[in-house]
Amino acid sequence: MSHPRWPRRLLRITAQFALGAVILVNLAAAKLAYISTHVLPADRPTFAQYATTPLAQAWGMLGGTTTDRPMSTATPDVVGLAYEVRSIPLDAGEQLEAWYVPEAQPRGVAIMFTGYMAAKDSMLRPAQELHQMGYACLLVDVRGAGGSSGELVTLGMREADDVAAAFGYAAQQWPGQPLVGYGISMGATALMRAAAQGQIAPAALILEGPFDSMLNTIGHRIERIAPRWPTSELVLLWGSLEIGQNGFAHNPSAYARAVTCPVLLMRGERDPWVRAEDMAAIAAALPTPPQVLTAPGEGHTMPFAVGAPGLWVPAVRSFLGGLPQ
């Protein structure tokens, strides 16, 4: 009597399903990474015009392609600030757009960088407050946002080069002025990376909600919708391949060891993406103990100058007041 063939067939079907599942999981991870790091160009063409690569076309066939480019809908004059539009040149014909808010007798220049998928109008309130504290302000769109060139977002990696360009521009335009870096989330991590790599030498850094590592912050988000492992690793792997940067090495808690200037760290008490232990890791790594501010009741809802001005304003004023004159 012949042996039944069903078990072997079952094994083959199971293997095929397993292979299909692996392919689908990787495809989903790759697509999520792509959408999270690519924005539509400033002139917002149709997808048919934009999808000129096989990868982009494949994503479009699956539904969804890129993220809408963040654009400013307000200007500094809505908060009573006079301003000038500045263009900061980059290599390969690219440029950053910035708003410069002058001050007659500045204590320094606050160079300001946004969070993920935000344009420079998101920093109007802290700019207003910093200006009242005596600082000229330079509000910068990193590449992939607002009036700046580019369609790629790297969550603080390539943005560190934008930080360096803005600081270099400020040093040329206003020589001798102390340069204070202010960053929100992605902007905060970009400032830390630029400082750690010696690209900038800030007088001080004001950092709202920097994450401790790229893998960790992806994990905090992924675990709400999928198993943290291996989904986080897959998303970061595909993202690294798509942007040409090693996201596994993007660790602000490691950058912190090389940041020697005074630092004010801020975190929302209920922030699900930047947790207390994440902020503690950064604080512990800084050579000089930072000032740390936790905003009660706030989440990842920065700038805290909007949600918790009664806490933000005196904390920032005190921190800046303690800097060498």
Image (cartoon, rainbow, N blue to C red):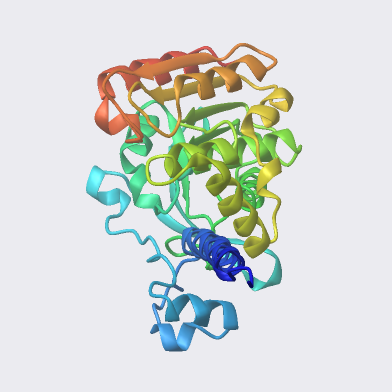
Residue 141 vertical position relative to residue 314 in the rendered view, above or below: below
**Residue that sits furthest to the right in the current view:** 198
Q: Quadrant of the C terminus?
A: top right
Left-right relation of 290 to 302: right
User: 123 above or below 94?
Assistant: above
User: How many numbered discs, if any?
Assistant: 0
Residue with the most extreme bottom position: 48
Q: Residue at 52% x, 12% y: name it.
A: 322
Percent of width and height locating residue 42? 43, 73
| Residue 325 in view here | no
- Residue drawn where x is 27% and y is 55% of the image: 74
Res 146 quadrant in image = bottom left
Q: Position of residue 246 (x, y in %)?
A: 71, 50
Q: Return the residue nearer the eye: 321 or 315.
A: 315
Look at the picture and state if 184 lies above or below 264: below
Nearest the viewer among 249 and 318 is 249
Query: Where residue 197 sits: x, y (%)?
Result: 75, 38
* Residue with the most extreme front position: 1
Taking the spot 71% from the left edge, 41% from the top edge, the residue there is 249
Residue 139 coordinates in the image, percent (x, y): 45, 47
Q: Examine the image and state in which quarter residue 280 appears.
A: top right
Residue drawn at x 59%, y 40% is 215
Of 221 and 299, the residue lying toward us = 221
